Image (cartoon, rainbow, N blue to C red):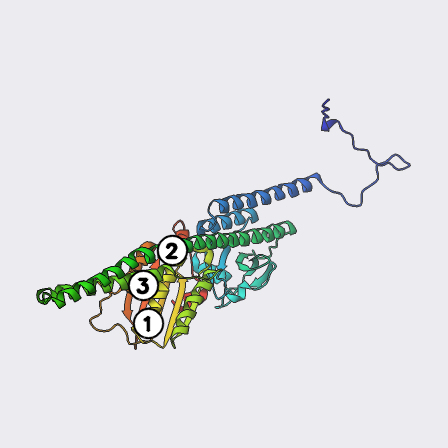
Amino acid sequence: MTCCTNLNSLKVPVAMNTNSRPLRRSVVEKPGNHRRDLAETTRALKCLYDIEKRFSAAPASSASYQYALDRIEHLLGFSGAAICLSNAGQQAAIMLASTPSESEARFAFCQTRNCRACLGGRKPHVTTAVGGARVLQVPLVTSKSRYGVISIRLPEGGTLNSQQRATLGTLGTRMALFAESAEIRIESERRALREERLAMARDLHDSLAHTLAYLKIQLLRLRNQLGSGGQANGLADVMNELSQGLTDANTQVRELISTFRLSLPQGSFEAALTHVAGQSASRSKMKVRVHNAIPASLLTANEQINMVQILKESLVNAERHASAGSVWVRLYLRNDGILTMEIEDDGIGIPPGISTSRRSKRYGLGIIRERTRILGGKIRFSKRQPTGTTVILKFMPESCKSHHRLGVGPDEQQRT
């Protein structure tokens, strides 16, 4: 049997004194306060749910961070906030979303010219920005890593209640988990791509490389037979051209196999860059310095592998052809959403007569141009003063194509 009770008919007993008068309560709780608290809690949960839903659909999109910022401001009832993500080494941060203009956000939120000033701490805390505004810093942290910070400009005389602080703390943890899960997913994709490339390398080695080697041997036998019979006089040039063609083809296939066998360490994009730079430095006397300001969660696995391959080929060129002593590598995101990788060396520069155009027959340059084409970007080679070569790669990551209100960290802004 189902029993249905009318809540309006319930009578709440009231304690009576000896004079049959109601006892006065020490604290009077107004029904309106309960309703306001319940409404505020409901709004907070709705905000967290909407952000969670958005990141589930597009976890690595910068537009998702802007959406989260808009929902935060709507919840708090005042404007002025920014979300910055940092790279694994905490060297610099990228302002992915901001409600003022980029320049206004710099004035309101950037405390110093060093991004590390905002990236410290594991709990929400209030700081004072260069412009004098009070800024609440909500770190994006998990139990393992720190991924960035949410900066919220507090209005004059305004504070956040315990409910709002708790909501922001929860949001900071959830957004850090979003970034962490994006990196885990990208690492899984990188592993799958690496296994596929290794399979292709094995196929090339077992088929085309062996075929070219066989043809080289057969050509040598044919030359010996023709030569011994005195019939090779008119075919000498043809035989030499065939031999050189097979040699070049075999060299390119071997280099292609080496490219497919590019081994990247487990872990972050930062670790992959450091690994390739360390390999190059260990083979030669070059000093390779890498400054990366790009969070790994903003790049797809394919973008990471192609960028690492471009860096590897550029370092090989600096080592083999430029006789460089030092190489400087910088990666940053411009405020229009364009990712830039600059590779500079202090070598002899581009030798006269060596073409860097699309018609160039140098295999390493071909790899660089093909990787750039896959990224949908542009590559430029130029002379560095006083000596050396500069290679500049520019492209827009997939995560930035839906939202262009981006900015580099203050260190990079000052440098550019």
Q: CA distance from mark 2 to mark 3?
A: 13 Å
Q: Secondary structure at mark 3?
A: helix
State which quadrant residue 294 falls in. bottom left
> Would you place residue 97 above or below residue 325 in this image?
above
Front residue (pair 402, 351)? 351
Secondary structure, mark 2, is helix
Residue identified by numbered label 2? 197
Give the residue pinned by disc 1: 318
Task: Return the disc, 1 or 2, that comes first in the chain's sequence.
Answer: 2
Identify residue type, mark 3: Glu
Q: Residue at x 50, y 51 (%)?
A: 69
Quarter occupied by residue 247: bottom left
Residue 377 pos. (x, y %):
32, 57
Residue 18 placement (x, y as % from top left)? 91, 36
Residue 315 visible to the viewer:
yes
Amino acid type shown at disc 2: Arg
Q: Quadrant of residue 362?
A: bottom left
Q: Are marks 3 and 1 in contact (CB under 8 Å)?
A: no
Crowding at dot 2, Cα within 10 Å, few <14 / some 14-19 / many 20+, comes out as some
N-terminal label among 2 and 3: 2
Mark whose residue sits in front, 1 or 2: 2
User: For mark 1, does the 10 Å Cα neighbourhood hold few (<14), some (14 to 19), or many (20 or more) residues?
Assistant: many
| Image position, residue 129 (x, y; %) | 53, 64
Q: Nearer the viewer, residue 89 or 248?
A: 248
Toward the viewer: 299 or 205? 205
Amino acid type for the residue under numbered disc 1: Ala
Residue of label 3: 255
Residue 399 vertical position relative to residue 242 in the rendered view, above or below:
above
At x 13% / y 68%, what residue is drawn? 228
| Mark 3 or mark 1, earlier in chain | 3
Reply above or below: 297 against 13. Answer: below
